[in-house]
Amino acid sequence: MPTSKRVFNWYISMVAAACMVLYGYDASVYNSVQGSKNWVAYFNDPSDNMIGLINSSYTIGAIIGGWFFGGPIADFFGRKVGMGIGCFLVIVSTFVQCFSPRGNIGCFLAGRTIIGFGQGIALVAGPIYIGECAPSHIRGKIMAFWQLFYSVGSFICFWVAYACSKHTASLGEWDWKMTVIFQLLVPVLVLCLLFTMPGTPRWYLKKNGNIEAARNALRRIRDTEEEVEAELLEIREALEFEKEAISSNYSALWKDRSVRKRLLIAFVLNAGQQITGQGSLNSYSTKIYQKVFKSASTIMLINALNATFGILFTLNAVWTVDRFGRKFLLVVGGVGMALSMLIVATVETQTPTLAGGAKSEPVAIAIVFLLFLFILFYKPSWGATIWIWTSEVFSMNVRAQAVGMCAQMQNVANAIVNQFFPLFLTSCGFYAFYMFAGINVLLAVFTFFCVPETKKMKLEEMDTLFGGANHVEKGANLMGYPSRETSIAGQGGRRVDEIAEVRESGQPDNKNAVHQVETVNSTR
């Protein structure tokens, strides 16, 4: 039976993960409004280049917000403030988009840029908050909900769009405005709930060395005083080593060889997430399905079902990511996505097209099934696992900035691909998907040879996987504390997170005091 504090830990993680609903909704809302004839008429039938530019404006705003502002805001003001600022900007930009003057597509484009900027900030703070609060033995499981909430955002958006598409005659131009305005729901909710959440203990210690604030935060999310004190000491030791031996600021991004190594790997993984084909499907599935179906309502329904199954498929990460590991999921996902893209491209290009420009019903159903199969492989692997891996591999001194930079590599890749994809799709049709098949094979090979496994590793000890020093051990030496390997009296040397895992499974433990507690208490 989970304890009340473990339930609270899940609660605060779900609130932080709700920031991903913003991303999922917005990635889908522009896709949805493109299928509205009222939206097209409202903005005077934008060209393919303009449609690509509107999509790119979001990613440009997100790149600027996440790369240059997300990390500093999360580090200076705190993770909660970063999420709050991002949600506030999403609210403002939603009104800008919804109430753009008729024919003024520049105003709509500005709203897209602002919303990208806000989400760029929120998407840095959210995963860091979860990673720094979640116990290491269930961190992957909790972080899987980050990507799950992306699918929840898409789910809400596409079903709202489908409902509006069934009442176009009565709604008029509000068939697309309703889809846009519903985006207010989640950021308003997150802003209200942020006040019930503690700050992260690692931020309290890094910002101003506030041990008591960090201790109080840990007491709200850890079951025993032993766990609180042991984790508190580990964080202090890691921070001491980073400050004395490396750098307490962002210069460690290029000074520390192990940080540089994981930064480059994370750049490739995050850019790869968007060039698997998923980024283009998110933004242009309406245009893609228009080559197969002629009914706008049918396309909206398929998008809604896609988002619904996306939630179910992402749930696979919850039970697989800590069991089989991050690397296994990425390799299997890459191979599965490659096969799906290869087959869907072959089916579409090698079957006849009917007089109206659509495919026969069996072929159309087969294409939809294959694209759903692609999502089955993508969601738990390159969807959820990339965020998990990125948020957990960096040391405290660079975590916020590094996660911000890596996350925005998704938008850099997305901006490049989505700017030319409408033209590529128009001129080449489904032959474009052969390209995605080849890319997915390369990503699977890269992961197999270059990406270390990180499941159940403690955040403060992650550096050892990349050829770096153990920050906890080195920090303990600098502070004159005993080795961390002599961890828990009476527990056969088991670590605090292992004891928490035993406790969660319902097995008894004797709750003896830890050596670290005695050390910390002696320094108070």
Image: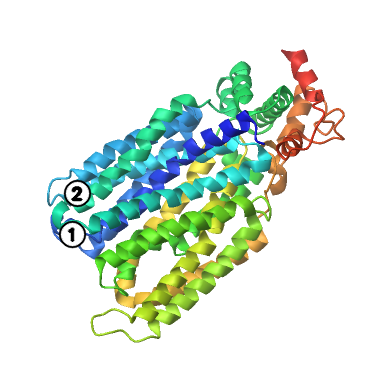
Which residue is disc 1 drawn over?
40
In the image, 386 versus 479, the foreground residue is 386
Left or right side of 8 for 477? right
Report the colour scheme. Answer: rainbow
Report x, y in % for residue 243. 64, 28
The amino acid pointed to by label 1 is: Val
Residue that badge 2 annotates: 106
Instruction: Please identify the quadrant where the N terminus is shown.
Output: top right
Helix, strand or loop at label 2? It is helix
Between 488 and 441, the one lying in front of the other is 488
Residue 344 lies in what quarter of the image?
bottom left
Residue in the picture at 74% in, 38% down:
506
| Above or below, comparing residue 379 to residue 343 in the picture | above
Q: Amino acid at mark 2?
A: Gly
Residue 242, percent across and down?
Answer: 66, 31
Labelled disc at residue 480: none
Q: Earlier in the sequence, mark 1 or mark 2?
A: 1
Give how far across and how far down residue 79 sits, in percent. 49, 31
Residue 240 appears in which quarter of the rendering? top right
Q: Which residue is depicted at the point 26% across and 73% down?
A: 294
Looking at the image, is mark 1 or mark 2 nearer the viewer? 1
Q: Can residue 63 be seen here?
A: no
